Amino acid sequence: MVRPPDALTELVTGLARRFTSPLRTPKLTAHLGLWLAAAFAVCFATGLLSHAIQHPPGWFRWPSRPVQLYRVTQGLHVATGLACFPLLTAKVWSVFPKLFTWPPARSVPHALERAAVALLSGAALFELVTGLLNIAYWYSLMPFGFVGAHYWTAWLLAGAVLLHVAAKLPVIRSALSTGSTTNGSTDRSRRGVLALVGTAAGVLTVATVGQTVRPLRHLSLLAPRLPDVGPQGVPVNKTAAAAGVTGVDAGYRLTVTGPGGRHALSLTDLRALPQVTVSLPIACVEGWSAGATWTGVRVVDLLRLVGAADLDLAVTVESLQPAGAYRTSTLDPGPARDPLTLLALQLGGEPLHPDHGYPCRLIAPNRPGVLQTKWVGALTVMSA
Ligand SMILES: Nc1nc2c(c(=O)[nH]1)N[C@H]1C(S)=C(S)[C@@H](COP(=O)(O)O)O[C@H]1N2
Ligand SMILES: [Mo]
């Protein structure tokens, strides 16, 4: 075996000694690890769910009830993801001197184990940073597709976490099974560190959850969008100008196409159909959400015009927006016929603001904001 030069060994072990603190115990690391694993598991599961709703595999059906479910799962995704930040920092701190162990790898399994830790830390940091950049709309800092990168790195991270836990299982077990030490002050200080980290995670959550929970909006220092700031008291992600939707005039027609034929409806025609008022949230993938009152025509009533009200067929919703990832969305057969699924003409009792989708927009229960298509120009019943 090649021995590292003595001077280097001394430098590294000297560095490690500098960072020793009696607060660093295997038990503290194990507790932080448990919290981190819980937060990560919730974040990963809710993330996979959100991805499946937006890019559904053939077998996947997302129901339209409970109405608020996506709002909750996506709120949890963003909140647990942010909570991982202080937890991860504290966990790295708790094992910091080990980063300087020398030689860096004692054996092949040890080298693999350390590689998994490096992968894990890198992937976790990548997820945090890209998540935050997405919330802040700094796409220019992400020269790659956010969705694919964030999604696939999450799988990589999950794999590295599993490897890491498997490798550390004996250490975790023994750290957690040691009862209170004879030295009560170690227990007290461990609880102190955990309380500090818990507080940091709590503060982060409170500083962002106001983007969803209106009573906490004034504490929402870190959230770029507030639930009641925007035209008609509702935030906007993409304005009509940014989407290139301009010049909607009296010539506007909504095209509804189905097995029973094609209808072209003017705004006057739409207003003459039965109007329904519902209370439904916009719940954006970025974690903000806002409840609002919408009035318009039930999609199922429009499907009836083309003989598709009782058919088990999905519906494509197409925007007047000329291009862009969110110009169309698909309504599954069930949700398309939900009595709460509307083509809304009004928000809060007034005609839709152009930025909210004038002349009409989709609003459906338990649906991610990205799929609440604005400036709708056509509904097309898909063939079986
Ligand atoms: N045509 C179209 N509809 C769209 C979008 C879009 O970019 N184009 N953005 C979506 C996103 S990401 C969200 S969160 C909601 C926001 O609706 P709001 O701007 O009325 O609050 O609209 C959705 N509808
Ligand atoms: Mo969104």
Image (spheres, rainbow, N blue to C red):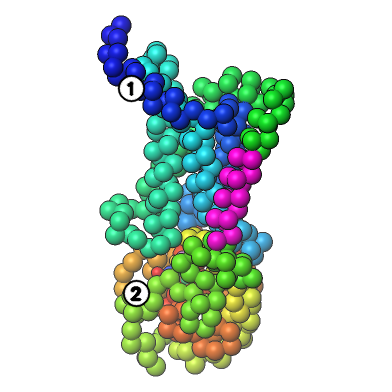
Q: Foreground residue, 55 or 196?
A: 196
Q: Residue at x 31, y 77 (%)?
A: 244
Q: Foreground residue, 100 or 149?
A: 100
Mark 1–mark 2 distance (CA, rounded to whole Å): 58 Å
Q: Residue at x 57, y 29 (%)?
A: 22
Q: What amino acid is labelled 2 in the image?
A: Ala
Name the dominant secondary structure of the magenta segment: helix
**Is there a contact, CB below 8 Å, between mark 1 and mark 2?**
no
277 up-or-down from 121: above or below? below
Instruction: Specify whether 156 is left or right of 271.
Output: left
Q: Which residue is mark 1?
A: 11
Q: Residue at x 58, y 45 (%)?
A: 197
x then y, percent, for residue 248? 37, 87
Residue range in magenta is 192-207
Q: Does residue 307 show up? A: no
The image quadrant that residue 67 belongs to is bottom right
Secondary element under disc 1, as helix, strand or loop, is helix
x then y, percent, for residue 164? 49, 27
Q: Is mark 2 within 8 Å of ligand 1?
A: yes
Q: Foreground residue, 193 or 167?
A: 193
Q: Is residue 27 magenta?
A: no
Which mark's residue is nearer the viewer, 1 or 2?
A: 1
Which is nearer the N-term, disc 1 or disc 2? 1
For the N terminus, the quadrant is top left
Q: Does residue 240 show up? A: yes
Q: What amino acid is labelled 1 in the image?
A: Leu
x then y, percent, for residue 112? 40, 21
Q: Which residue is mark 2?
A: 243
How many neighbours does mark 1 have within 10 angstroms: few (below 14), some (14-19), or many (20 or more)?
Answer: few
Secondary element under disc 2, as helix, strand or loop, is helix
* Residue found farthest to the top: 1
